[in-house]
Image (cartoon, rainbow, N blue to C red):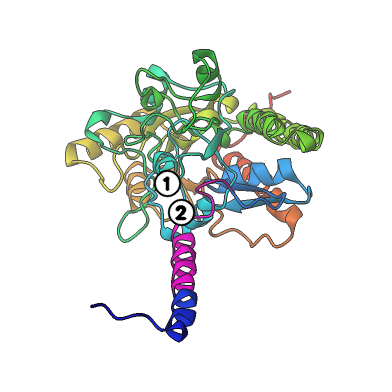
Amino acid sequence: MGQTQSPARSRWVLPVVLVGVVGLLAAIGMVVPKGQGGAADDGKLRIVCTFLPVYVFTQNVVGDIPDVDVQLLVDRDVGCPHSYSLTGRDLKLISRADLVVANGLGAEPFLSELLRSRRDLKIVTISDDCDLIGGETANAHAGCSHDHAAHEHKGCSHDHEGEQTKACPHDHGSDGHAGCTHDHHGGHENEKDARACCTHDHDHDHDSDVNPHTWVSPRQAARQVRTLAARLAEIDADRADVYRANAEAYAQRLEALAQRMEEAAKSFANRNIVTGHAAFDYLARDLGLNIVATLREIPGETGSAAEMAKLIDTVRATKPAAIFWEPPFGDKLAETIARETGTAVYPLNPFNTDAGLPEATTPEQKRRLYEDVMNQNLATLQRALGATPSPQD
């Protein structure tokens, strides 16, 4: 015969069970990210930007709007995000975000991983309206001779001995959905909407034929800023007018910067240059520069002796004004080619990172980082490429 539970025992068993259930629910709540069902509903718009140029552009578009929080995903001293691996801290940041702002065009391969971690995540790509360099032009400038399907990466401009790998512009591993502003869980209402909000080709990955370094051109950067404002206005209609006004003011500053650079370029005596990788193709197009060679096709490799000899022959034959490496990293390959050919070597910053720059402490200094770097680049180009001698009277 079973024992009968005493009234005293019954009085404490139920509270213990309830405490256990509450504890289990609390534990589940701690495990499941807040953002799994959307960001915290406190009226704030939480934006996460993939890397430095996207972050600076977004800061300018948002300006001083209250209750819009803008965070940076990839640390500002890392450099190009192509080979970046997401950390636990990154995923925690994304779990609380309403949307991610990205450059797109395969510059951030980790976007597909973000979508796996947050199926409801909105990703806004800002290069959708840019005048792209692609196909044969991009491949020629990039110096690419390998098979991208084999996941070979090209394009690093610094010495990889013990340093962070950076710079390949191609998305070799994304699932093709990195460039969307829609909810991937819910899908599209129609194919037209799908094409409108995505930067990828639904049939194949065409990003490998497009140079993603749009932001290095102030002209293209101005387009990106206006695109960003339009996307934010759609998502956050209550603040749409402020986004557009901030973006237009910033875009006009960028266009004025582009005009100054283009005017200065008219006096360049030698327009042939060598770059570390294809980061400067858009800027070269703006300024009428001819990229005669790039130093690297695959990060971490200096190439064979035959390839090195060919590169040296190319530099000797084309007589470029300068070989450019990307700060803050040193570049032994650039120094070697410069020494062998008697070519000058200079730093040129594609604004992947602000490492090595004076610290920006105020909001205004942070918003002007891109302009400051491009003005430095202009001064470097003027020094390196010289000026056309004035006609003799």
Q: Residue furthest bottom?
A: 8
Quadrant where the C terminus sits is: top right
Give the percent coordinates (x, y) of residue 173: 32, 36
What residue would you read off at disc 1? 117
Give the percent coordinates (x, y) of residue 326: 47, 48
Q: Report the disc number at residue 91.
A: 2
Give the percent coordinates (x, y) of residue 12: 47, 81
Magenta stretch, overall SS: helix
Q: Nearer the viewer, mark 1 or mark 2?
A: 1
Q: Residue at x 79, y 36 (%)?
A: 238
Q: Residue furthest front?
A: 1
Q: Name above or below for residue 345 compared with residue 393.
A: below
Q: Residue at x 57, y 36 (%)?
A: 215
Front one among 28 and 5: 5
Q: Residue at x 71, y 36 (%)?
A: 236
**Quick one: SS at disc 2?**
helix
Residue 359, image quadrant: bottom right
Q: Is residue 14 visible?
A: yes
Q: Magenta part of the protein: which range?
A: 17-38
Q: Amino acid at mark 1?
A: Ser
Front one among 302 and 125: 125
Is residue 232 rendered to the left or right of residue 324? right
Quadrant where the N terminus sits is: bottom left
* Tag 1 and tag 2, C-beta contact below 8 Å: yes
